[in-house]
Image (spheres, helix red, strand yellow):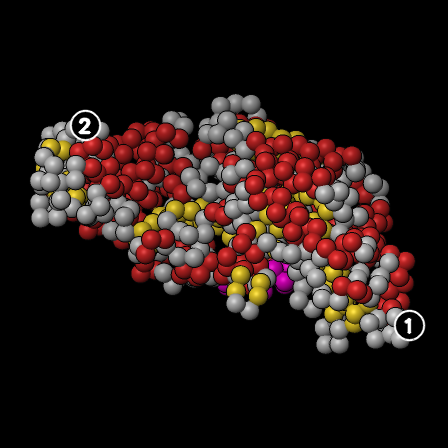
Amino acid sequence: MYRSHVLVCGGTGCTSSGCEKIIQALNKELKSNNLENEVSVVKTGCHGLCALGPIMIVYPEASFYSMVKEEDVPEIVSEHLLKGRVVSRLLYDETVTEEGIKHLKDTDFYKKQHRIALRNCGVINPELIDEYIGTHGYEALGKVLTEMTADDVIQTLLDSGLRGRGGAGFPTGLKWKFAKGNDADQKYVCCNADEGDPGAFMDRSVLEGDPHVVLEAMTIAGYAIGASQGYIYIRAEYPIAVERLKIAIDQAREYGLLGKNIFGSDFSFDIDLRLGAGAFVCGEETALMTSIEGNRGEPRPRPPFPALKGLFGKPTILNNVETYANIPQIILNGADWFASMGTEKSKGTKVFALGGKIKNTGLVEIPMGTTLREIVDEIGGGIPNGKKFKAAQTGGPSGGCIPAECFDVKIDFDNLIEIGSMMGSGGLIVMDEDNCMVDIAKFFLEFTVEESCGKCAPCRIGTKRMYEILEKITEGKADMDDLVKLEELCEHLKENSLCALGQTAPNPVISTLHYFRDEYIAHIVDKKCPAGVCKSLLTFKIIPDKCRGCTLCARVCPNDAIIGKVKEAHIIDPVKCVKCGACVEKCRFDAIIKE
Amino acid sequence: MKSLEELKAIREKMQGQIGIREEDALQTRVVVGMATCGIASGARPVLNKLSDMVQEKNLNYILVTQTGCIGLCQYEPIVEVMEPGKEKITYVKMTPEKAEEVVEQHFVRGQVVGKYTLNSENL
């Protein structure tokens, strides 16, 4: 047994900021201090505060060290682990107060969070099934198999009000009920781990931090609908998650928690992984199943819905990773417990991946009904560099923007749709006054052009044409007729595309047009980009009165576009200027402006 | 694994160990002085004994932690027990054997082991 546990985050964020080196250094230092039998080093999943990685938490004191460097490790070992003196200088600064050290859960980032799907992320070692069992893992499965009928399970889910976390928010219990009601010799349970929205990493974090919860929930689903085989469709770009899932599946089979006659019942279930090559369209349910079948990942029209004819033509349910992560807790704590959280029609919590212009980039889980203001200003720590909040983008390429005037809208499935965005899988990208909304819309359209599978014309051609119009606008070559065409195309795509990819592709354009129409007009009529992003519409100028003639700008200019003598005002040659902005950054007298 | 009992056995074994990662303000804090003086007089085996036994016995309400010099170097190893709402108990000149007795008597049964405390006349 160990008297102290050192948890080091091994999520993708902290892995890229060097947690492996920290773990190696820790093991080495512990050994040289003869502490290896007293202190255990645990590599966990994501702890949420990715901006401050690598993250290390030392228990039992619960000291939260952030941005740990390899060279800090000897001090942590010799001071904290050996002598019990917490190394204050390395603590997360929010936990250090005048009255002493605050608990992590009382900091702004964590205090409004409520972790259900993420409850084990950053707490257990995801590669040890025993640790999952130690936090009541597989207890829900045991309860389901010994005390509940399939109908009980489905009724519990219906009563809980759980809606799919993949984006559309379809009631999970209803989906299961349909699949159960369709008789067949074989049914399937699938997990959608093909998280593809730019900026979204919730599902990856759950799989990296707590893979067994997904296996347990899928097995419960198998029992509820009468399936004996499950597939997890995960993108190959998530190597850590794939590795941990493989380990988890092996361990579960070894313990008999997957396989034949689970817990001595006559129920048998097994799960296999299927790796996707990273096509965005494979997150669409029919395309995903087509891909599992071994065919090119293209969607097909619905109906028939997968609950009737899904994978290999058999009744199938497909749920998202985060949806599954909620289910064992609902079984153990009851539907009422889950339904007591959230808003009237959106129960429970939602995980968001915070990104963009925000201080605390990372992963947060909040009760439904939390306002955007609470997420951005309190949990997220606000916008850096004193800039002003402009909008938040949710739902990725299928979603839209939430402008500052909707800052106090309670976030849930229905409210977001009402204001022209959508929950999506949970990516939340914060934008400040330096972001051009036309440019953002263009960015997402560029993504959908790339990711359109090409099967149906509205999506294949429509997204391309929309992108071209947006490009014209950002280059200052568009007129008002183009805007009319753009809006027409939005409608056509929405109505005529085969699957959700094309149907929702215009959303970023529709919502930015709705809330930031004046920015489009400024690009088209005034040929100006108010945020100063679209290069074709910018000119760089030197204010002669402010220029001291230090020549610094001329030296950094990559294209020799700046001319002038020492101690005399310089000028920029607009023909040669490539608008890279290097001179603006270097000028110490704020003499260079872009307009 | 063929039964719920086996699952329960693993869970209970692991809960003691993972319990260390919980943050609960209402816990009893058991603090071992681990400054140079404490380590030199044998605080480490005491700390390990306390920590192991608390985990083995699944005493989740007890947090065994360490601190620096408590200031009474001649009485080291020192173990302080802080129960919410109760006066602090200070055990002095501890050994792993004494620690075992403290866990059995004090932590499990709630009876302070008077003969090892700072106020004891035996010192």
Residue found 76% across the figure and 63% down from its top: B73
Disc 2: host chain: A
The label nearer to you, 1 versus 2, is 1
> Can you say which quadrant of the picture contains the C terminus of chain A?
top left
Under circle 1, the secondary element is: loop
Give the image quarter of residue A507: top left
Q: Nearer the viewer, residue B105 or A73?
A: A73
Please provide percent x and percent y for residue A53. 52, 45
Residue found 20% across the figure and 32% down from its top: A555
10 Å crowding of disc 2: few (<14), some (14-19), many (20+): few
Disc 1: host chain: B
Q: Which residue is mark 2?
A: A559
Task: Decide if residue A527 is in sight here.
Answer: no
Q: Amino acid at mark 1?
A: Asn
| Marks 1 and 2, how far apart at CA | 87 Å
Q: Which mark is residue B122?
A: 1
Above or below, comparing residue A155 to residue A240 in the picture: below
Above or below, comparing residue B89 to residue A170 in the picture: below
Please provide percent x and percent y for residue A382. 39, 57
Q: Amino acid at mark 2?
A: Asn
Residue A375 located left or right of residue A315: left
Q: Nearer the viewer, residue A462 or A467?
A: A467
Q: Nearer the viewer, residue A490 or A395?
A: A395
- Point out the stretch of residues depicted in magenta: A335-344
Residue found 11% across the figure and 40% down from its top: A567
Task: Decide if residue A357 is in sight here.
Answer: yes
